[in-house]
Image (spheres, rainbow, N blue to C red):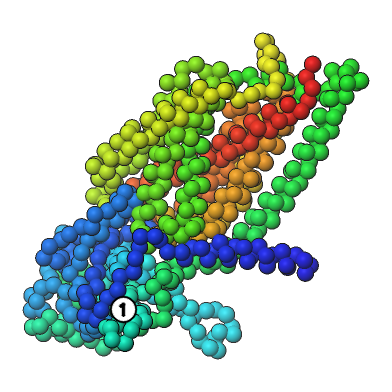
Amino acid sequence: FSFLQERLRYVLGLLLLLHSTDSFYVPGVAPINFHRNDPVEIKAVKLTSSRTQLPYEYYSLPFCQPSKITYKAENLGEVLRGDRIVNTPFQVSMNVEKKCEVLCNFPNKPVTLTMEQSKLMAERIREDYYVHLIADNLPVATRLEFYSNREEEEKKKEKDVQFEHGYRLGFMDGNKFYLHNHLSFILYYHREDVEESQEHTYRVVRFEVIPQSIKLEDLKADEKSMCTLPEATGSAPQEIDPTKENQLLFTYSVHWEESDIKWASRWDTYLTMSDVQIHWFSIINSVVVVFFLSGILSMIIIRTLRKDIANYNKEDDIEDTMEESGWKLVHGDVFRPPQYPMILSSLLGSGIQLFCMILIVIFVAMLGMLSPSSRGALMTTACFLFMFMGVFGGFFAGRLYRTLKGHRWKKGAFCTATLYPGVVFGICFVLNCFIWGKHSSGAVPFPTMVALLCMWFGISLPLVYLGYYFGFRKQPYDNPVRTNQIPRQIPEQRWYMNKFVGILMAGILPFGAMFIELFFIFSAIWENQFYYLFGFLFLVFIILVVSCSQISIVMVYFQLCAEDYRWWWRTFLVSGGSAFYVLIYAVFYFVNKLDIVEFIPSLLYFGYTALMVLSFWLLTGTIGFYAAYMFVRKIYAAVKID
C-alpha cells in the first residue's frame, strides 16, 4: 500500500510540474509600468451570452460613446472569436480614486433611450448578456462570495470567493428589467521596487467591478459631473421599460488597492475558477485505467500471436496447418487494395494534418506560449499550422495512394487538399450566413473570409501538392506477402463482427479516458470560460493516441481471425468510434448544461459540434489506421508463407 502511495505521489509531482508550466509568460507580452496619474485605458471587448451563443460588439447597445471611436487592429483568432476591441469614455488614472462620476451627458441632461433602444436593452437583459471590458489587457471580473456548506466552516463563516467573467448587463425581477448603470471599478496594483531617487512605478494586477442599478432620481449629480451615491438600503434600481422612452445616467467610480500579486501571476485569479481537484482525479483515473487495460490487451495479443506464429511456422505439421483457420488463411488477400482508395488516402492525409496541428498546438500551449493573455493566439496558431501541415498530409496521402495501386496523383492531391477543408468551409459559411442575419460580431467579416480562402488556395493547396508529389514518387509501403489474383470468399460473419457493434465497442476506451477533459473544453467553448490546463490536455492526448492504437489493433486482429480481409475502411471507421460518443456527450451537454432555447443558437451549437465530431473522427481514425497497418505488416512478415 505504501508503495502505491509512493507511486501516486510521484505521478502527482509530475503533473504538478506540468501544471506549473501553465503560468509561463508569453514571449512578446511585456508588462506596462505606470506612474501615478498615468491614464489606464479601459477598453470594451464584446457582449456575450451562453444562452444565445451570439457575441455582439459593445456599441451595438446605446452605451456612452467617446468623441472618437477607435477599434484595435485584431489578429485572425480575435476576429473568429467575435472580439471587437474598442475604446470607451471611462477616465481612469493610476492610483487616483474617483467617488462617483457621470460618464456622458451633463447631470441636468440625462441619457434618453428611445423606445427601440429600450426594447433592445431589455431584450439583451432577458437573454442574460455579460459585458466584457479590459484594462491593461486584463479582463474584468465580478467577485461572487458565498458561504461553504461545510460544518466546520460555519463557525468561522469563511466565504468562498469565485470570479465570473465580465459583469451582467442587468437583471430581471418578475417581468421588469433593470439595467446596471453604475459601475464600481476596483483595480489592484503592484508597486514595483525602484531605487530611492526614482518615482514609484505601478503595474495593474487585477480588475474587478461591482455593477449596480441606481434610479436616476437617487443619483444626486452636480454641474461638474460629480455625483453622490445613495445609501445602499434606500435606493431603487433603474428600470428599463421596453414600451416607452427611458431616462437614466451612466455613472462609475474607481477605487485602487495595493496587492502582493506579482505581474507574472496576475492571470491566476481568472484561471483558478474551476475546481482543479477534479482534473487530478480524472487524469489519474484515466492513466490507471488505460495502462491497466493496455497491459491486459498487450499481453493477450502478444501471447496469442506468439502461439499463432509458432503454430504456423512448424514445418513438420504442414498438413495440420492446412486445416488451420485464422488470420494466416487470408494472407493472399489481406493487402488487396480497397474500394475508393483515393478518398481513403485523402481522408487519412487530412487526419495526419490534424494530428500534427493538434500535437504542436497543445505542446506549445503547454509551454505557456499561448496563454489567454495573448487573445486569439490559439486560434491564429491553429489556422496557420493546419495550412503548413499540408506538406505532411500530402506526403502520407500520396505514399498510401501509390501503395494502394492508384495512378491519378494530381486528382488525389486535389482531393486531399479540398475534401475535409471544403466540408469545414461549407458548414462554417452556412452558419456564418445565419450569424450575419443576426448582426452579431461573431460573423466572420467578408475580407477575413477572402483572406482565409487565399490561405487555403495559396498556402495549403500548393503545400499538399508538393507533399503528395514526393509521397507518390517515394517507394510504396513494402507489403510482406503477395496478393492472389482471385479474391477469396469471405465466410458469413457473426453478429458481433458488424461494423456498428465494432464502432460502439472500440469507442468506449478512448472516450472514457478523455471525457472529463471534454467537459472543461466544452465549458471553455460554450460558457465563456478560460481553458488553460494544457499540461493535462497533453497527457490526455497521449492517452488517447495509445488507447486508439491498441483498440484498433485488437479489432483488426479479431477481424482477420474471422477471415474477413476487408480491413482498410473498416479500421478507419471503427477506430473513430469515440467520435460517436463525443456526439452523444454533446447532445447530453446541450440538454443538461446549456439553456439554449432559440433556433439559431441551437443550429450554431450543433453545426460546430458536427465539425468537432468530424475532425475528431478523422484524427482518431487516422491514429487507429496507421497502428493497424503497421501491426498487419508485422504479423504477416513474421510467418513463413509457402
Mark 1 residue element? strand
Image: 482 above or below 536: above
The answer to whether residue 165 is left or right of residue 356 is left
**What count of labels does the image hold?**
1
Quadrant where the N terminus lies?
bottom right
Q: Position of residue 559 (x, y in %)?
A: 70, 29
The answer to whether residue 592 is left or right of residue 374 is right
Query: Visible in this render: residue 442?
Result: no
Image: 101 above or below 125: below
Toward the right, the furthest residue is: 316
Q: Residue at x 30, y 70 (%)?
A: 32
Q: Residue at x 89, y 17 (%)?
A: 319
- Mark 1 crowd level (few <14, some 14–19, many ≥20, 10 Å Cα): many
Q: Position of residue 318 (x, y in %)?
A: 88, 18
Image: 183 above or below 50: below
Q: Residue at x 64, y 31 (%)?
A: 629
Q: Position of residue 22 (x, y in %)?
A: 49, 63
Q: Residue at x 22, y 61 (%)?
A: 86
Quadrant where the C terminus lies?
top right
Query: Visible in this render: residue 222?
Result: yes
Q: Quadrant of residue 238?
A: bottom left
Toward the top, the furthest residue is: 485
- Name the residue that disc number 1 marks: 202
Q: Quadrant of residue 220?
A: bottom left
Q: Amino acid at mark 1?
A: Tyr
